[in-house]
């Protein structure tokens, strides 16, 4: 899984299962993700990489600058993904 800051991932386990999240930072064993609402940028969620599925989407710095921009960007991606599946 090739992840970097700004990548959009789908959660496969936990309370946030099925939701799309943005990668905010990485370390050796964990990936820190936010969604702008339940997990704001100031309080990222530490996730095991095995519990995340990579997507082809990524967000630029402006889209992850604030919680509001992050929520809007992820919502737009969710609607794009659901339209493409139909």
Image (spheres, rainbow, N blue to C red):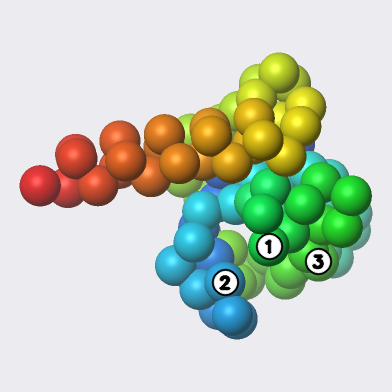
User: Looking at the image, is 11 positioned above or below residue 74?
Assistant: below
Would residue 22 be found to the left or right of residue 46 on screen? Answer: left
Residue depicted at 76% across the width and 32% down the height: 66
**Quarter-wise, where is residue 69 in the image?**
top right
Looking at the rendered image, the disc whose residue lies closer to the viewer, 1 or 2, is 1
In the picture of the structure, the residue carrying the numbered disc 3 is 46
| Crowd tier of the residue under label 1, counting other residues whose Cα lies within 10 Å: few below 14, some 14–19, many 20 or above | few
Helix, strand or loop for disc 1: loop
Is residue 47 among what the camera can see?
yes
Residue 46 x, y percent position in the rendering: 81, 66
Question: Disc 1 versus disc 3: distance between alpha carbons?
Answer: 13 Å
Circle nearer the N terminus (1, 2):
2
Mark 1 and mark 2 in contact? Answer it, CB < 8 Å. yes
Tell me, yes or no, whether the two marked residues, 2 and 3, touch with CB atoms within 8 Å: no
Residue 56, position in %: x, y? 45, 36
Kind of element beneath mark 2: loop
Q: Residues within 10 Å of mark 2 (few under 14, many from 20)?
A: some
The one of 69 and 1 positioned closer to us in this rendering:
69
Q: Which mark is residue 38?
A: 1
Q: Say which mark, if any, is on residue 16.
A: 2
Q: Is residue 15 above or below residue 49?
A: below
How much space separates mark 1 and mark 2, taking CA atoms? 9 Å
Q: Is residue 81 left or right of residue 26?
A: left
């Amino acid at each position: 899984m090739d992840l970097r800051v700004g990548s959009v991932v789908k959660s496969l386990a936990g309370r946030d299962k099925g939701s799309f999240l943005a990668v905010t930072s990485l370390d050796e064993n964990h990936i820190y993700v936010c969604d702008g609402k339940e997990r704001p940028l100031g309080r990222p969620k530490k996730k095991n990489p095995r519990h995340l599925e990579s997507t082809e989407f990524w967000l630029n710095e402006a889209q992850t600058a604030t919680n509001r921009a992050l929520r809007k960007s992820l919502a737009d991606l969710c609607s794009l993904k659901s339209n493409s599946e139909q």
